[in-house]
Image (tube, grey):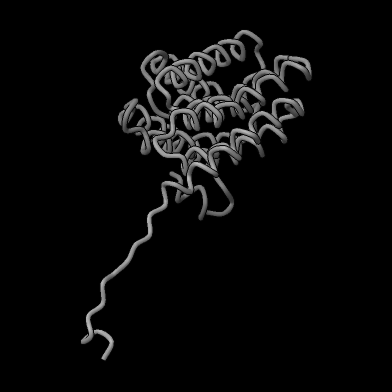
Amino acid sequence: GDVLWNRVRPRNVRYAREAIAAYLAVAEAMFDPDDWAISDKSLSRAFVLMRTLGRQSEDQVPVVGVAQAFLERLTGRDRSFYSQRLIELLMGEVSDVAELTKMLGIAEGIVNDALASRDFYRARAYYDVSIPLSSRLGYDAIMLQGLRIASAETYVKEAEASPTEMERAMNLRIAVQELRKAGASAERRAEVSQMLDEAQIVSINEMATVSTPLSESDLA
């Protein structure tokens, strides 16, 4: 259906709808919280075709419905990023406050779970969807800034958990930059900058001189 939809002129809507149905079937068959790449690729293509037909088309209901069902099935089980992808797909299609609130709750829950398990990269990924969701729900500028600062602070937490001072310094360097972009106070930025200076000094002690003994034959 997808090939016919793209190549046959004039375009026949039936081909797009057949392709959507096929992609949804594959997405469902390959649904797996831990190995979700194929499911995501198929569902994402279904969204592209749906949008090509128009957001008000009858095809929106089944496509959005499948994504919402997947998100429901993943709740409490997602240790990866499929929920993030689903929320990104749904944000542009859903306007119902209850649905947006539900998605925000899911994202916040995963942020908390990720922070508890020190999975800071995953925490930031779900902050990245929590912020626009909060904006859609009418959160004020101060609350949105708080979320951005919280996301930036994950780099400080990651630095504190770093096994080496060099890695600690790298994360603190990013933290200073992200806190500045998020609008954190000058006092907090100065505090983290001081932590960075200290980590950089200590990291020098981790560097070892590597020497290779040379024989006279090597120099000949």
Q: Is residue 29 left or right of residue 173?
A: left
The foreground one among 1 and 156 is 156
Tell me, yes or no, if residue 58 can be seen here.
no
- Quarter of the image for the N terminus: give it: top left
Residue located 32% across and 27% down the image:
32
The foreground one among 150 and 2 is 150
The foreground one among 83 and 126 is 126
Q: Splitting the image into 4 quarters, where does residue 73 fall?
A: top left
Residue furthest to the bottom: 220
Q: Position of residue 66 (x, y in %)?
A: 45, 22
Q: Splitting the image into 4 quarters, where does residue 113 fall?
A: top left
Question: Looking at the image, is 9 positioned above or below residue 165?
Answer: below
Q: Position of residue 103 (x, y in %)?
A: 55, 16
Q: Splitting the image into 4 quarters, where does residue 101 fall?
A: top right
Q: Position of residue 53 (x, y in %)?
A: 60, 36
- Quarter of the image for the C terminus: give it: bottom left
Tell me, yes or no, if residue 50 can be seen here.
yes
Tally the marks.
Answer: 0
Q: Is residue 25 left or right of residue 183?
A: left
Residue located 58% across and 15% down the image:
104
Residue located 36% across and 17% down the image:
77
Residue furthest to the front: 216
Q: Position of residue 30 (x, y in %)?
A: 31, 31
